[in-house]
Each structure stands twice: as structure tokens, then as C-alpha cells.
Amino acid sequence: MMNGTLLRFRIMAYVVGCGLLLLVGVAMPLKYAANSPTMVQIVSPIHGLLYMMYIAMTVLLARESGWRSQRTLGVLLAGTIPFLSFWMERKVLRWVQSSPSSAKSVRQ
């Protein structure tokens, strides 16, 4: 069902975005500025697992929505750049809602 897939994608986009901000904005500065690698050692593998889930949700949504590979790749790469996953989540929501083939299942 498109609605469930879209919801799971949106959740993962926010979770991955927040995890990346935590990693880049807090953990990495602590590692290099304060010589404290503990937070990187904790946050990095968690973010990696969450990013893999983001990849899975993106691929499922892309397949259900009939996206071309370039669009799918762009959405996947958005999860690797701080703040971009938040912007891309909104853009994906508009794409899916404006798609004639998925309009019925999203609105239900």
C-alpha cells in the first residue's frame, strides 16, 4: 500500500537526517576537537543501520511510484548530506501526492 510505504519513508528520512546531524554536528567535533571518540563509536554504526533502512524504504517507494533510476539515486544521496534529507522528504511527498497513479492510494 503506497500510504504505508510513503509513511515509512518519511519517518526514515527524518530519523536518518537527525542521526546524520548528531554524527556530523556533535560526535565528529567531539572526536577531533576534544579527543573523545566514544560518541562516534556509538552513533556511527547506528546511523549506518538506519541509513540501510532508509535505502530499503527509498527503493520500495521508488518501485511502487515508478521512479526513474536518476530520481531514486538522488533521493538515496540526500540521506548522506546534512539537512538535505529533510528537504528531500518534502519533495518526495509532493512527487508521490501529485502522481496520478498513486493519488488514490495516498489519499485513502
Image: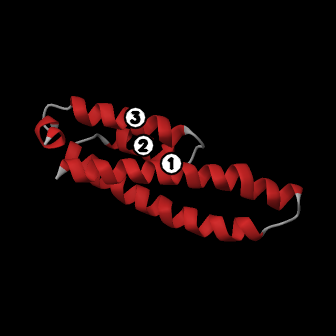
Q: Residues within 10 Å of mark 1 (few under 14, many from 20)?
A: many
Q: Residues within 10 Å of mark 2 (few under 14, many from 20)?
A: many
Left or right? Give the position of 95 relative to 55: left
Q: Which mark is residue 17?
A: none
Which mark is nearer the camera, 3 or 1? 3
Q: What residue is shown with label 3?
A: 90
Q: Residues within 10 Å of mark 3 (few under 14, many from 20)?
A: few
Q: CA distance from mark 3 to mark 2?
A: 11 Å
Say which amino acid is labelled 3. Answer: Arg
Give the residue drawn at x 58%, y 55%.
Answer: 19
* SS at circle 3: helix
Say which amino acid is labelled 2. Answer: Val
Q: Measuring from the top left, give residue 91's x and y in whole percent.
A: 38, 32
The numbered mark, 3 or 2, whose residue comes first in the sequence reads 2
Residue 65 versus residue 98 in the image, above or below? below
Do the CB atoms of the residues marked 3 and 1 lie less than 8 Å apart? Answer: no
Left or right? Give the position of 90 relative to 101: right
Q: CA distance from mark 1 to mark 2?
A: 7 Å
Q: Measuring from the top left, give residue 43's x and y in whole percent.
A: 64, 65
Quarter occupied by the C terminus? top left
Do the CB atoms of the residues marked 1 and 2 lie less than 8 Å apart? Answer: yes
User: Which residue is most to the right?
Assistant: 34
Do the CB atoms of the residues marked 3 and 2 lie less than 8 Å apart? Answer: no
Q: What residue is shown with label 1?
A: 79
